[in-house]
Image (cartoon, rainbow, N blue to C red):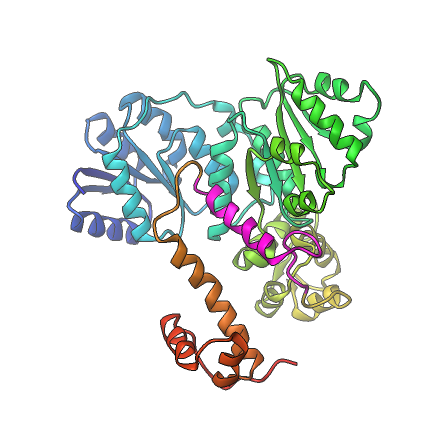
Amino acid sequence: MDGTVLVADDDRTIRTVLTQALTRAGCKVHATSSLVTLMRWVDEGKGDLVISDVVMPDGNGLDQLPKIADARPGLPVIVISAQNTIMTAIQAAEADAYDYLPKPFDLPDLMKRAARALEVKRRAPVTRNPDIAATEQGGDLPLVGRTAVMQELYRLVARVMNTQLPVLITGESGTGKSLIARAVHDFSDRRSLPFVVVSASDLEGMDGPSTVLNRAMGGSILFDEVSDLSEPAQARIVRMLDSLGDNAPRIMATSQSDLMVRMEDGHFREDLFYRLGGVTVAVPSLRERVDDIPLLADHFLARAERDGGPVRRFGDAAIDLVRAYSWPGNVRQLENAVRRLVFTAAEEEITRGEVEMVLGNQPAIEPLRSGGEGEKLSASVAKHLRRYFDLHGGVLPPPGLYNRILKEVEGPLIEIALDSTGGNQAKCADLLGINRNTLRKKITDLDIRVTRRRKLM
């Protein structure tokens, strides 16, 4: 890399790490804990790239992006933040940040992004809409998370919110699909226009579709749980979408069923499937982002306190149990459980026993649901692969995809087979239908820890 990088972060350790890494890569580095100093350097013409935190002692890093764009058009800014909410990603995108990374960030990944930022000529800056930064609506959205899967979701939402493409939002019940749709609308250029949620009854009669379009007035239309609509309702939607004129609304739909499977089974119209699937946004279940569960639990405690509830906090043993539970009802079930604990806990600290009481009549483990009952394995794999490609936007994933996917599949398959055969490698090889020496090599290559295991019944 070649260039001068301006680093602004109030954490001395982060400044030191970034300074050392960028210097070793061939860059000159100026690091500061002050946004005032950062802006002085920018005004003086210093720097080919800015890496800035959001929350700083003397202000908000996002608020400086329009000023940087005015002072130095084309100067790329990479935003790093511990405020890992969808609002941070959207605000960074609206403020024309070159890139956004959550803390804790992966240093090699940040270095690659910094190298690209130094090489790629920035496009002409756009004016940031002040309404985005001023809104407080994001504070109540339970779309928070530090996990990689949620950060990828945030970035995808930020990329698609001002496109004209239809958006299909998939995920299990309770994951927040409708909230994602609302966020896409509320932080898009259509935010001042209506947001219309459409049910089957809204489409009844000859005038149903035209009434829906008149209500939307060029805003956004959400078909909630579109997979539940009857064939006649689906047909009316197709005709409605084909009749859209110049003032067409943004079309979104949610579904907790795999629409491709339902289409293959004859329960969903193929023409509607392709009209709705411009961009697919897959909302992960809590089982796919376990590390976010304590963060969400604390978020709901704080919300209950703001609503007038008593002050509560989780004891260590209690939060361990909350984290270990499978949460088949996802974020909605977690929120309801936390609200019950707020008012049933005897003391300020919520105990493990009190959590057990709330969860006592619910199953400890739920089967993984990824797209409805009876879903074929190939359809489930295809769904995850489509999501992986979608997360890269219009850019292809890095080379070597075939071997990465094989490794992702082989590892769990061999581990489960070993568990099922009690760790007996001969039986495991026979079960898998491969040579024992091949199994040993794969165990070594995939770094699978082999112990004598209890056979699963």
Q: Nearer the viewer, residue 375 or 286?
A: 375
Picture quadrant of residue 121? top left
Q: Which residues are magenta?
A: 366-392
Residue 224 in percent (x, y) is at 71, 36
Q: Position of residue 175 (x, y in %)?
A: 64, 48
Q: Is residue 445 left or right of residue 303?
A: left
Q: Quadrant of the N terminus?
A: top left
Q: Nearer the viewer, residue 142 or 210?
A: 210
Residue drawn at (56%, 49%) of the image: 383
Question: In the rendered image of this protein, does residue 310 appear above or below residue 117?
Answer: below
Task: For the C terminus, give its image quadrant.
Answer: bottom right
Q: Is residue 225 visible?
A: no
Residue 413 appears in the figure = yes
Q: Is residue 378 left or right of residue 309?
A: left
- Counting the numbered discs, the total is 0
Against 395, is 122 above or below?
A: above
Q: Position of residue 208 (x, y in %)?
A: 79, 22
Across and down, in percent, residue 185 comes to 59, 29
- Which residue is at 32% across, 25% downward? 123
Q: Is residue 373 magenta?
A: yes
Q: Residue furthest right?
A: 205
Residue at (63% x, 52% y) in the render: 301
